[in-house]
Amino acid sequence: MTLSQQERENFLAEPHTGSLAVVEGSGRAPLVVPIWYHYEPGGELWINTGADTRKTRAIRAAGRFSMLAQRTEPTVRYVSVEGPVLAIEPGSAESSRVMAARYLAPDKVDAFVEFERTQLGEHVVIRMRPERWLSADLGA
């Protein structure tokens, strides 16, 4: 069954690992990679990623991307969104902290942020406005 607007937005706001998809060019299937994401109901979806990664270059070229969040327990449920990139901004320790706190135990956040900032290089925050939604709860 399709989820209501409130159900799909609330589900997307939960900390699932997303599957980001973006077109890389003609003659290729879309690039699909796992990613942490942040979303609050009614707002923008944003990711924090390396400034010069394959996915970042593809997103810059395409100007849009899709993202799927799913679970398998207690029922199979998913939400997929697609939309335009609104901004690509320099990442910060604060954006890294917000994202890490969404996915990691509180005692692991500082170490992760330090590792990301010192070992993984420059990051960017990419903001997307969800325009198209697909959703279902296959156990409903």
Image (cartoon, rainbow, N blue to C red):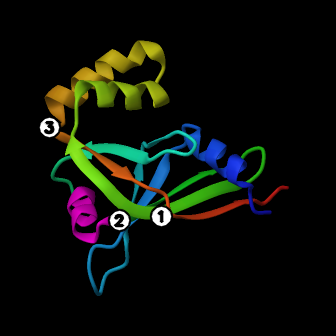
User: Residues under labels 2 and 1: Cα distance?
Assistant: 7 Å
Q: Are marks 2 and 1 in contact (CB under 8 Å)?
A: yes
Q: Which residue is mark 1?
A: 82
Classify mark 3: residues with Cα within 10 Å, few (<14), some (14-19) or many (20+). Answer: few
What residue is drawn where x is 71% and y is 48%? 7
Residue 23, position as x, y percentages in the image: 33, 73
**4, above or below 38, in the image:** below
Q: Which residue is mark 2?
A: 64
Q: Is residue 22 left or right of residue 137?
A: left
Left or right: where 112 falls relative to 134 = left
Q: Which residues are magenta?
A: 54-64
Q: Residue at x 20, y 40 (%)?
A: 123
Report the front residue among 39 and 16. 39
* SS state under label 1: strand
**Disc 1 residue type?**
Glu
Image location of residue 67, percent across then percent down: 47, 58
Q: Amino acid at mark 2?
A: Arg
Upstream in the sequence, badge 2 or badge 3? 2
Q: Is residue 53 above or below residue 65?
A: above
Which of marks 1 and 2 precedes in the sequence? 2
Where residue 110 appears, as percent x and y from the top left, is: 32, 16
| Residue 119 in sight here | yes
Q: Quadrant of the N terminus?
A: bottom right
Query: Which residue is found at the position 29% from the left and 87% from the top?
Result: 27
Residue type, mark 3 in image: Gly
Question: For residue 121, which numbered disc appears in the image?
Answer: 3
